[in-house]
Image (tube, rainbow, N blue to C red):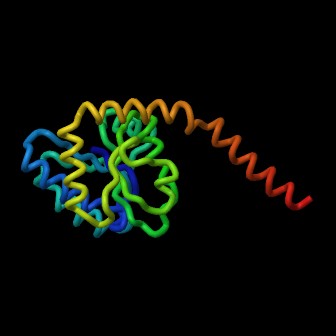
Amino acid sequence: ILYLSNLIEEKGYRLLRDAVETVAHERPGAIQLDYAGGFVTDAEKSAFLASIASSPFISYHGIVRGDDKRRLLQQSHVLALPTWYPFEGQPICILEGYAAGCAVLTTDHSGIFDVFTPGENGWAVEKQSVRSIEEALRDCLDRRDQLAEIAHRNAALAREVFTPERYNDALLAIVDDALGEQR
């Protein structure tokens, strides 16, 4: 499992940790959680690192870029972002997860369901619910064949739909529309 975003309370990173700890104790050796991203304050970072210090199945990698980011994404099976952050849009990490062939675990929040369909791209969980995250994680472990199907589907979706060319074309269409209204 990979969490790849800023570590802000409302993005659900602590709830994810709690859910993974429960499932990892139920199924030793079955799950690994990697965090990558920055904290708002040094105090929050210190508190979080202390909370995972004795967990052999949870790692924090700091802020990652380039090859380190690519490696983490490619080693992961699931990208998790159980967010309810008020300023969330369409998180780029979800699209990065698709491109790397990850299934996604996320919430119905802000613009996420514009690019995510539950069951098709991964698992939707309830906002602020450790129990819902736990259930999704168990389902991932119990249905590995479905996990592989979702991963392949997401990688194909990224290659076909979420390309720089399509993004640029859509952006140019918006600009053209805006300029057309001014004429």
Left or right for 81, reference 92 = left
Against 178, is 40 above or below? below
Residue under the point 41% across and 35% down: 70
Tally of numbered tags:
0
Residue under the point 51% across and 58% down: 111
Where in the figure is residue 64, as x and y percent of width and height? 39, 45
**Image quadrant of residue 49?**
bottom left
Where in the figure is residue 159, as x and y percent of width and height? 52, 31
Looking at the figure, which quarter contains the N terminus? top left
Where in the figure is residue 101, as x and y percent of width and height? 39, 33
Residue under the point 31% across and 31% down: 148
Judge by depth and name the residue closer to the eye, 69 or 131.
131
Judge by depth and name the residue closer to the eye, 56 or 127.
127
Whether residue 61 is visible to the viewer of this picture, yes or no, is yes
Left or right for 144, reference 39 = left
Q: Which residue is at the far front?
A: 119
Looking at the figure, which quarter contains the C terminus? bottom right
Against 160, is 139 above or below? below
Residue under the point 64% across and 42% down: 167
Where in the figure is residue 84, as x and y percent of width and height? 39, 65
Whether residue 39 is visible to the viewer of this picture, yes or no, is no
Judge by depth and name the residue closer to the eye, 136 or 47.
136
Left or right for 37, reference 164 = left
**Image quadrant of residue 154?**
top left
